Image (cartoon, rainbow, N blue to C red):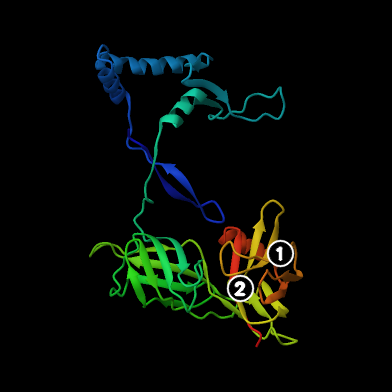
Amino acid sequence: MTTIQWRPQVNALTKPQSYRPQVVPRGTSGYDEMAADLSAAHPNYNADLLRSVAPLIMNWIQQQMINGWQVTFQDAFTFHPSLNGRMAGPDDPLPADEDLLQVNAYASRPFVQAVRNAARLERLPMSEKLPLVTSTEDTKLKLADVLNPAGVLHLTGSNLYFDEEDPDSGCVIAGTQSGESKQSTFGTISNSDVLLVPNIPAQAQPWNNEYTLSLTTQYTEHGTRRTGLYRRRLRSPLTAAKLGHPNPPETGILSGNGASPLVSIKGGTVAADERLRIQAVLDPLTDRLLLNLLDMKEGGAAGAETAVTANGNFTLQGFSGSAVSSLEISVNDYAALKVLIHDHYSGRLADVLDVKLA
């Protein structure tokens, strides 16, 4: 049995970025193909006769609708005319619109269910041959989309291979506010994997820790260079220093490329230096943000969530076993933070924090 082939396509109308499955027809069948297949399966029926009858059936359906009838083939298809227009009152004339009269055709529920039961789906790669980075992970922290200056970044995807010696090909990490760095230290470079030691460009402000990643390659000697942009943003760790002091400096976190931080750490209760994470999740049911502290393992320990619906000062509680009992934060621009999380982070934004006493 052959399959129904499909491939993922970018849904450009959604934020955050999403994809939609699109069926890829193997070809187009018509009267000739139908007649040949039916005649082969039922030799008593002549292919030429079947071919000549098929258009007559279509003409009959058309004439029935012209005469105001609905045509229903049991457990197969229904055809009927409809009107598409708007009238201000029940006695108004029909709109003078050439699109007023419509023709509708749809499959019956048993027909659709039979196709669903018998069909098998086959996934195809995205149509345009581009470097496609599907995921990134820091191999030391084991966290996705983290740019760790002391780690190794693992890229996975398809069509990733590039010639490291080609000056016009390679991998570029760029800050969303400023700065750009072509990467130069690689382990593995293959079509499905790239390992690199990230050279992270500096940005204008400490809280500008957001980056994009792109790969450029050339598949043939004289071919066009093609660039694929990773559709998620990467973030580098931040340091919250002097939290053992009575008046520590503020540390910007959970921000984008702005000239001021969306959220700031203002203080906390800390017993020892610790690396942890802080996350903000957009709750679509209540239209609010939920902030809390996490350990360094996905699915690990987590502090209690704090609901945030406006600018203000909040206390985030630590999690079991953490040297950080609490962090005092200030949400400086709640509206911009919500937009950032929704549009660019699929509803969840997390920063790695190095919390320091000194």
Q: Quadrant of the C terminus?
A: bottom right
Name which of mark 2 and mark 1 comes first in the sequence. 2
- Image height of 101 relative to 71, above or below: below
Q: Quadrant of the N terminus?
A: top left
| Residue assigned mark 1 | 304
**Camera-side residue: 244 or 127?**
244
As shown in the figure, which amino acid type bears the numbered disc 2?
A: Leu
User: Mark 1 falls on what kind of element?
Assistant: loop
In the figure, residue 55 lies in which quadrant? top left
Residue drawn at point x = 75 percent, y = 70 percent: 314
In the figure, residue 270 lies in which quadrant? bottom right
Task: Give the total number of marks visible in the rendering.
Answer: 2
190 left or right of 83 in image? left
72 left or right of 317 in image? left
The reply to whether residue 341 is in sight is yes
The reply to whether residue 260 is in sight is no
Q: Position of residue 154 (x, y in %)?
A: 42, 68
Residue drawn at point x = 56 percent, y = 81 percent: 204
- Image height of 98 relative to 223, above or below: above
**Camera-side residue: 123 or 201?**
123
Q: Position of residue 313 (x, y in %)?
A: 76, 72
| Residue assigned mark 2 | 276
User: Mark 2 falls on what kind of element?
Assistant: strand
As shown in the figure, which amino acid type bears the numbered disc 1?
A: Ala
10 Å neighbourhood of mark 1: few (<14), some, or many (≥20)? Answer: some
Residue drawn at point x = 41 percent, y = 30 percent: 118
100 left or right of 43 in image? right
Q: Position of residue 212 (x, y in %)?
A: 48, 69
Q: Position of residue 47 (x, y in %)?
A: 25, 17
In the figure, residue 302 lies in which quadrant? bottom right
